[in-house]
Image (spheres, grey):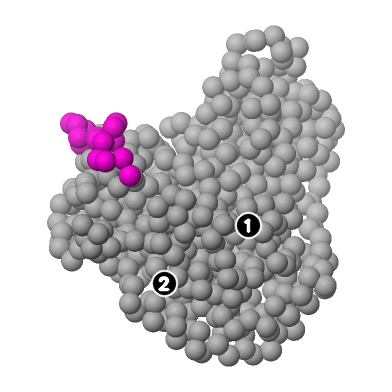
Amino acid sequence: MQLNGAEILIECLKEQGVDTVFGYPGGAILNVYDELYKHRNEIRHILTSHEQGASHAADGYARATGKVGVCLATSGPGATNLVTGIATAYMDSIPIVAITCNVGVPLLGKDSFQEIDITGITMPITKYNFIVKDVTKLADTIRKAFRIAKSGRPGPVLIDIPKDVTSNVTEYIREEPGKQAQPESYISEEEVDRAVELIRESTRPYVFVGGGAVLSGASDEIMEFVNLVDAPVTDTLMGKGAFPGTDPRYTGMLGMHGTKASNYGVSGCDLLIVFGARFSDRVTGNTETFAKDAKILQFDIDPAEINKNIVIDAQVVGDIRAALREVNKKLTQQDHHEWLETVEGYKKKYPLKYHPEGLSGPFIVEEIYRQTEGDALIVTEVGQHQMWAAQYYKYTKPGTLLTSGGLGTMGYGLGAALGAKTGCPEKTVVNIAGDGCFRMNMNEIATAVRHNIPVIEVVVNNHVLGMVRQWQDLFYDERYSATVLRDAVDFVKLAEAMGAVGIRAETRDEFRDAFAKALTLNRPVVIDCQIDCDDKVWPMVAPGATISEAFDEDDMKKER
């Protein structure tokens, strides 16, 4: 049938099973929005307050549902406003397709009104991007974009469509999405055999789980593997939920704000088995001394990650779930009870703890865990509250912590929470924010109200940029340059002005009551939690130090 470019775009989205898109209209993308209006009963459009909110919402939707998230923006500033969200998705390997419309083909390269080379801008932060100047190539380009976004190591893809291409007409023939090749076909038997050999030789193995394990859906295989190997388990921020945080073998997060048990255990192991982690500097500390007594066995779908940050001893390249199925077939039951007892001793000697009085970030997170019975989708911004959410909420399923791990994007969480709740309306969705982060994206509360998306926004409000101030306190002789936010801004009134429910909590009992109320309202709620500006995230590893040099508040007092 003969369709114009905008009609082809909508039909291709329907081919791919897209039921929701997030975006903001403008002149160059008007033809697409006109078609969206005609298909509004088939594809829901969420009008965000800012294009960056749309890109974060597509990201949150993808993380929560496992589908490809889709966001739309017009040319020029509309397109550039997507950039931070695209970069966030790229760093965390999240499959989104960003669709922008540009000025007409004859106007490209002439500094036309609202013209921007968005494909040039996003080239370093996308898996692939396209500018489609010929309507006959549009359908195949859209199909290819979705294949690229979700295949292999997932990631964002951008399609830029000049306005005249959205109005030009060509023949459209519907196609069903093709099936992906089976991941098992890419696994090297030689690499699997070498992995099994190293595991059998080990007496102090440690399993380290990263975001790739979440993306591969390998939780069941990891559990089987851990039971066979009889090893303790740690994870990254992005790996939360791939292995249950309630399991006795779990020792907490690794790295700068990881537990002492994990940092000491990894430092003393003789084999570190890594599933889908990229050895971020926040995890390794000093790379020269990271797991220096251990052989390292790395499982990763991306061969570029092998020996990139840490030199390893063996690898299995391929989909982690597929690779583990092959490894588990060849493993026999191991027994490392003495090693597990040693690590359990670390857990008992160095538990996570916080001040027993007053309202604090850790208490807030534990109370959210208690009231949601560990069954919420937790979204975070970036900072101290993010680390507390990683430390004190027990994630038992993959895809239940949505957070910007690689780019560390302040302003990510509320948009992502809207996307997550839209994709999983039956789930309780809580965005845990700092007051600095909330200032960056609080306009999306209006989006939540407009579309009746009942997210719960918990603002851990210490009136400072908490994590930066913590560094200033510890490493910059308490020179609090540009990190104090004490002013007249009232988050409760702001929430009410945008049509949401606003509640202030200054004590533990007030927060308990406020959160319990929020769970019953089925409306967007903002809870402004007043905590002390000097609360810190413990433990901590100083920048460039060895992870076994983790210190906490008690260590600081001893030094003084």
**Separation of disc 2 and disc 1 at Cα?**
22 Å
Specify start and end residues of the magenta stretch as a single range.
475-490
Classified by dominant secondary structure, the portion drawn in magenta counts as: loop
Q: Residue at x 46, y 61 (%)?
A: 547
Looking at the picture, tell me which residue is in the foreground, 374 or 550.
550
Q: Which residue is mark 1?
A: 310
From the viewer's perspective, tell me whether residue 179 is left or right of residue 75. right
Q: Quadrant of the C terminus?
A: bottom left
Q: Residue at x 56, y 84 (%)?
A: 230
Residue 480 within the magenta-colored segment of the rendering: yes
Which tag, 2 or 1, sits closer to the chain's start? 2
Q: Quadrant of the N terminus?
A: top right
The disc labelled 1 sits on which kind of residue? Ile
Residue 105 within the magenta-colored segment of the rendering: no
Q: Residue at x 57, y 39 (%)?
A: 87
Q: Which residue is mark 2?
A: 261
